[in-house]
Amino acid sequence: MTKTLTIQDFFKCFPTDEACITHLFELRFGADFACPKCGEIGKFRKLAKQPAYTCNCGHHIHPMVGTMFKDSHTPLAKWFYAIYLFTTTRHGVPAKELQRQLGVSYPTAFRMAHLIRDHMASVDGDPPLSGHVELDETYVGGRSHGITGRGAKGKTVVFGMLERGGDVMTRVVPNAKQRTLEPHIVRNVEKYSTISTDEWGAYHRLNKIGYTHGAVNHGKKRYVDGIHHTNSLEGFWSQIKRSIRGTHVHVSPKYLAKYLGEFEYRYNLRHQPHWMFWRLVESF
Ligand SMILES: [Zn+2]
């Protein structure tokens, strides 16, 4: 499926709290789940007015225990709808917006947003990158408006690695020095991959450590040099910056990695928007 999940599709699958709990139970325990107490298979039924199942023998199963919903008093239907929102907006969902749409308190919305972002990051994982990979750093936030470039004060440094036609991966890093960036490259980009960067000195050794490296000289206003450019990654950066400016106003450095994980998740599933939602609700 290449289409985005419509709101009609969503409510058809998850019209009620009951439907969401049933989904969770079936996903986690399944039809051939044997009761841990009596050993019988298929004797579970949903308890009325409780997010729990009971076996004929009286043994209870709480499908939310062991998931991100475990300590939550928020109805599961609201959680599922929040997840739906996270997977269908390009620019992310600020906690204020969740608060409005779900009718929950701001702290609840804030907590939900962070747990959903954590879930997105863990489901996305970090598969190694290969083929042709673009590397670049960017500077996010801070008060020093108008100051850009490396070493800008008060800004958070984010390092990005993007496989053309494949996944993007980001890391919040203390600085953009070679000894900071190189371990991330070695760990996440397969040897013998082709790498494109700009002329920043931190990348000068890449040819020596097993990569085919080419750089474009942005300082001399050269943005493409044969196959070498970092346009895909720069596109990803500008989308994040637009979104942070437009919807989140300010993201503290502490939470930036989580926001980045959210954007990575959507980017990495950009060719299967339908799956953006299903992959999350199939993996609690
Ligand atoms: Zn039983």
Image (cartoon, grey):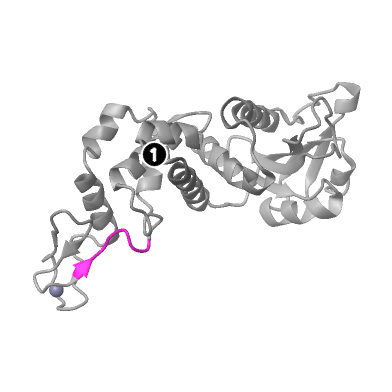
- Quadrant of ligand 1: it is bottom left
Overall secondary structure of the magenta section:
loop
Q: In what quadrant of the picture does the N terminus appear?
A: top left
Q: Secondary structure at mark 1?
A: helix
Q: In what quadrant of the picture does the C terminus appear?
A: bottom left
**Foreground of the two, 230 or 149:** 149
Identify the residue shown where x is 21% and y is 45%: 19
Rate crowding at label 1 as few (under 14), some (14 to 19) or many (20 or more) other CA atoms within 10 Å.
many
Q: How many numbered tags mark residues here?
A: 1
Lateral position of residue 276 relative to residue 247, left or right: left
The quadrant in which residue 136 appears is top right
Q: Position of residue 108 (x, y in %)?
A: 43, 46
Highlighted magenta segment, given as a residue range: 60-66
Q: Which residue is mark 1?
A: 82
Q: Is residue 75 above or below residue 217?
A: below
Residue pushed farthest top?
A: 221
Identify the residue shown where x is 8% and y is 70%: 56
Q: Position of residue 198 (x, y in %)?
A: 82, 34
Q: Position of residue 235 (x, y in %)?
A: 66, 27
